[in-house]
Amino acid sequence: MLLATLGAEAYVLSRLRFDRFIIATVLGGTALCVNYLSYTSIAERNYDGSSQVEYIQFISEHLRLPDTYACGACGHPPLYYLLGAAWSKAVHTSTGMPLDLCLKWLSLLLFFGFVVFALLIVRSCTLDKTSQRLAAALIVFWPSSIINSVRVHNDALASLLMLAALFFVANWDRTGRKRDLYFAICASALGLLTKASAYAVVVTVLCFVSLWLFRQAMHKDKTLLRQGIMQASIALIVFAGVALLAVVLRASRETTTLCQKVLGHACDGRYVPLAVDTPGRYFYFDVPDFVLRMDATPLNPTRDYFLNRLLKSSLFGTTPLGGEFAGTSYERLSVLISLLLLAMILICFVSAPLLRQTDFSRVYLGSTIIMLLCLLAFRLRAPNEFHEDFRHIFAALVPLCLFYTLIVERLRAFSKVLYVTGVMIGVLMVLSSVAFFVRIS
């Protein structure tokens, strides 16, 4: 499995003309992910992993979709589970590989697709080799990247499709090629058939199509305006049709509210947090708690802050890491990784004015803001500690890492010391993540 995956990845990346350092980085990341896979079961750091498998097994055995309430994950749209059933049956039949390993391998391949689009996004925004390599290493070796790379979950396909949609809509916004917009529409539509998280990229596509229409109306270019209206109409028709299909597929006698029909089991009122929501919960940030604690769940429920959970889940997920990561060395590494993340955020806030308008695509900036707002709205509508998990907007990791590397690149013109410091913080984050997850024996 490892050799076949490494060979395929090397071939794809070389055909896309990435340099040897980036290819080696991706292959090294894949090796680390397989190493992580070797000591991680489907249920570990994946709170509904068994339910995901149950959904796939039902389709594989009965050749139809289960009822929405037949399993915990059965309220999700079916695209990932159809793919998982077809893939696991084909691989198991041809190789005899166990089901859990088949599905982990599928997640690893989907994560590679995510990485490919991430690298294409980075290359489209900077030609600086150091920046490209640093961004690639951060994305591939980010702690939650390792965790999510082999998780058996529909997030694996949803994140890939969401990132692909962002890449194509950014290309369309920059070049005006209709083909890129249609690819973005297709990727977003497939995302809706995978998970409701894709509504964030649907909103992004519609926002930038509307912005393009507004610009053409201001310029009074009737030809381009008619063309834009047609494209916007296609996007609306496709998204409305696919959203309706997702609702129909989720239909059940027990889905009575609109929220349940659109978002599935997320609106069932499960896992309601112990602490009552207050405005301060979404604005406060407890620095000592974030740095010193490895898990996202606080010891004191009254200090359960949204930003703490969001940032911590961007590193280690929402569920506890488990016994494999118990011990002083892992606690120290988690403290170091948390401090490095805060340092990266501080650099971004302080140095953001240095970026020129052309350095960073407005689509990537706008989409990141939209995804964060959608996650916040999701958490407010369906109070649940699992609904403030960064994995719902995992595609935002790419623009955020790119934003950091572009800022570090701009620092080079002002101070060599600051530039080297920024690079070293990124490198130290990568090395710390590798040390945290690798197992020699």
Image (cartoon, rainbow, N blue to C red):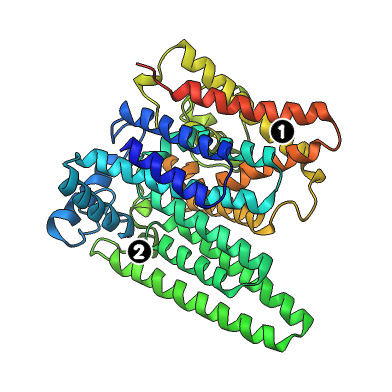
Is 200 located above or below residue 326 in the figure? Answer: below
Q: Is residue 273 visible?
A: no
User: Which residue, given by chain and number where applicable, does mark 2 sit on?
Assistant: 261
The residue lying at 47 percent from left, 17 percent from top is 330
* Residue located 19% across and 56% down the image: 59
Res 52 visible: yes
Considering the numbered disc 2 on the image, is that residue within a helix, a strand or a loop? helix
Q: x, y percentage for residue 364?
A: 63, 54
**Horizontal side, residue 56 vs residue 139: left or right:** left
Q: Is residue 24 above or below residue 165?
A: above
- Residue occupying the point 86% across, 35% down: 414
- Residue under label 1, please give it: 346
Q: Position of residue 373 (x, y in %)?
A: 58, 53
- Residue 310 vs residue 9: left or right? right
**Crowd tier of the residue under label 2, counting other residues whose Cα lies within 10 Å: few below 14, some 14–19, many 20 or above:** many
**Amino acid at dot 1:** Leu
Along the line of sight, the residue nearer the viewer: 384 or 101: 101
Q: Nearer the viewer, residue 5 or 86?
A: 5
Q: Position of residue 102 (x, y in %)?
A: 25, 43
Secondary structure beneath dot 1 equals: helix
Disc 2 residue type? Answer: Lys
Q: Quadrant of the C terminus?
A: top left
